[in-house]
Image (spheres, grey):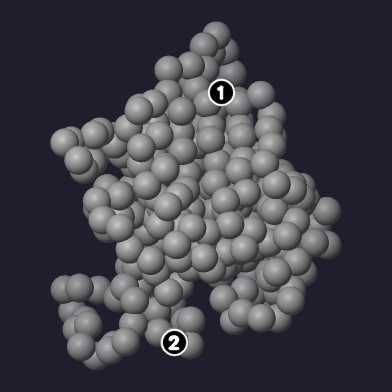
Amino acid sequence: MSRINNESKHTLMQTFSLHEGYYSVGIDKKFIPFDPKTDDKKDRKGSLFIHVQPFLVQHNNDLIVIDTGLGQHRNGELLIHSNIRKEGFDPSDVNLVLMSHLHQDHSSGMVFEKDGKLEITFPNAEYVIQRQEWEEAYSGNSSSYRTEVFDVLQRSGQVQFVEGNGQLNDYIRYELSGGHTKAHQVFHIEGDDQLVFYGGDEWPEPEQALRQFMAKYDYDGRKAMELREQYANSAAENNWKCLFYHANDTSIATIAKQDESFKIIPA
């Protein structure tokens, strides 16, 4: 039974991390499950090691997924569906899917395989995607995109393309940020007392606010670095609740200023 409250007079907003696991990623862009208890990083030399966790936000009667993960299955069920049910919700109640960008670790879970064919993971949802990001994905310049996933989504008619910055509805705002990919976007979701911020892969781990660096995996490393600092300052000044897609430990947190640095406070 769904936990959605249909009688709330004030904004009911809850956030949930839908953790999909820990992976190593080699130059072939394949995500291989990694268990620190049994696997040795030395055996996967040259790989990145990252956690993957989409998010679920309940905002009054709306149920929102933010990025969709790798589309993993466990015990015969799509993992993101299972994780949503564990939080007390029904995946069929998801009515919005917000996509920061379309790299495979964020977008493969937009569809899933059933009876030998790909189907939409959230059949009652509208998928919000930057139009330029969609076009970049089909340009063929990067192996990070799985266009067979996008083909299924396109046929569904459930894509809402947005361009630049804008207001999706009365409580969700999107910004074309363009640091991690050329048309990466971030989201602001407003509640009565607090704003939820999702920085996608421009601020995927809270600890990145504690140091300045330019990453080779970003489309514009300098811009992404500058954006992280902007996001962290705004989060601290305005008490944002921040969601971190690749966080090791703290995937939902607030940020506080501490001298010349920042303090991460699990939320």
The quadrant of the picture occupied by the C terminus is top left
Q: Amino acid at mark 2?
A: Ile
Give the residue drawn at x 64%, y 75%.
Answer: 146
Relative depth, front residue between 18 and 254 = 254
Residue under pointer 1: 60
Q: Locate residue 143 relative to residue 261 in the image: left or right.
A: right
- Label 1 crowd (10 A; few <14 / some 14-19 / many >=20): some
Give the residue drawn at x 40%, y 57%.
Answer: 225
Give the residue drawn at x 46%, y 28%.
Answer: 195
Residue 33 appears at what percent x and percent y? 35, 75
In this picture, is 45 found above or below 16? below
Relative depth, front residue between 26 and 155 = 26
Relative depth, front residue between 235 and 25 = 235
Mark 1 or mark 2: which comes first in sequence? 2
Q: Amino acid at mark 1?
A: Asn
In this picture, is 252 found above or below 120? above
Residue 105 appears at what percent x and percent y? 50, 67
Q: Which of the numbered marks, if any, corresponds to residue 27?
A: 2
Residue 142 appears at what percent x and percent y? 61, 79
The quarter holding residue 219 reads: bottom right
Q: Label 2: state its secondary structure.
A: loop
**Which of the two marks, 1 or 2, is nearer to us in this view?**
2
